[in-house]
Amino acid sequence: MKELLPGIEAWLDSRKPFALATVIQTWGSSPRPAGSAMIVSEEMELAGSVSGGCVEGAVIREALPLIREGGSRRLAFGVADEDAWAVGLSCGGKMQVFLERFLAFDERPEEQAAWEKLHHCLRHDEPCILLTRLQDGPGRHTLVLPDGSTLGQAAGPALASAALQAYRERRHQVVEAEGGSYFAQIFPRRSRMIIIGAAHITADLVQLAQLFGFETIVIVPSGVFAGKTQFAVPPDQLFMQYPAEVLPRFELDAYTYAVVLSHDPKIDDNALHLLLPSEAAYIGALGSQKTHAKRVARLQAAGFSEEAIGRIHAPVGVDINAQTPREIAMSIMGEVVKVKNAFL
């Protein structure tokens, strides 16, 4: 839904009623993943997609009465001989779509509260989880924030906990809690890449990370090395301090990706001692297998478990036989994207 926000805002500003269709579950070769969304107006205008064209026509037909009368419906699509080329999925997969008049049009105060906070979060890059009750009839939405607080329809601790688990897993999903089925749609803040050390690889990695939508933070204790690094695209933040002085300022959560590039054990280990116990999704460290073996020995001596040390991706990056700094940066970016999309 996040990518549809400009269209949603424009249609709301023009008082154009519309429905929201969201893919909630898929099986097999479904053309669009869970979380994919589409908005449909009463004039059958579309933005977004739920299948790339296979079932959009059927979704539009089901949407029109909901736009006029309100409510929601759970739809299922698969392959059957009589409709495989009509409203089925010719790719052989199965999918479920939840269709509802957009919650902003619901006058109940609970629904308005959920939408207003969701809108704020989407506009200001603040994380949240939207819970949608999967039942026909009037919509029911609860917004859960990372601190466990909720807005909108009432949610007990079990439901809020299930939403937060989906957030940690970085995966939209159907959850069963408190006697009902809900779709937990996660809206994380912008993914963050923390790079320790300034070198040619750092400059190329910052450029690639920003190309893929990451916030970039570079930490390098020596201002001399930072000053000599030529950034074609400057990082969002640059700190000339030791990692231990900077990392506690950031939430090292499941949307944080850290890469250690300094080559200096004093700096690398300083960062790893804070990163390994954290919930960071990715921890990569530059160096050969011999260098990493020495790193492992130091971390073991410092009391870190084999499981914790095993979180380190080293040698860092996807093996593409990279030679140049730019190629090494590309291999690192490929590995980060692989980890980022593991649960999608």
Image (cartoon, rainbow, N blue to C red):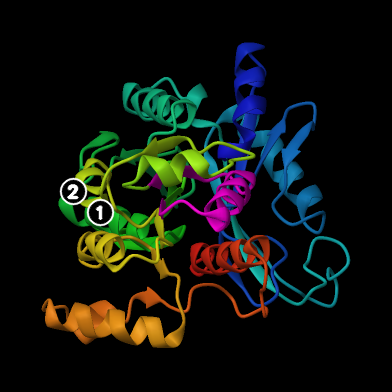
Instruction: Name the residue type under label 1.
Output: Leu
Per the rendering, the mark at residue 174 is none
Residue at 52% from the left image edge and 53% from the top image edge: 202
- Compared to 6, does 206 lie above or below? below
Q: For label 1, count other residues whose C-alpha is less than 10 Å away and answer few (under 14), some (14-19) or many (20+).
A: many
Tell me the magenta residue range: 195-219
In front here: 176 or 277?
A: 277
* The N terminus lies in quadrant: top right
Q: Position of residue 90 (x, y in %)?
A: 83, 71
Q: Identify the residue position indicated by label 1 in the image.
A: 159
In the image, taking residue 20 as reference, residue 312 lies left or right, namely left
Q: Identify the residue position indicated by label 2 in the image.
A: 156
Residue at 13% from the left image edge and 82% from the top image edge: 301
Residue at 72% from the left image edge and 48% from the top image edge: 49
In front here: 71 or 185?
A: 185
- SS at circle 2: loop
- SS at circle 1: helix
Labelled pair 2, 1 in contact (Cβ < 8 Å): yes
State the count of labels: 2
Task: Find out whether residue 2 is within the magenta segment.
Answer: no
Q: Position of residue 341 (x, y in %)?
A: 54, 64
Q: Quadrant of residue 47?
A: top right
- Compared to 273, does 65 lie above or below? above
Regarding residue 58, the answer to whether it shows in the image is yes
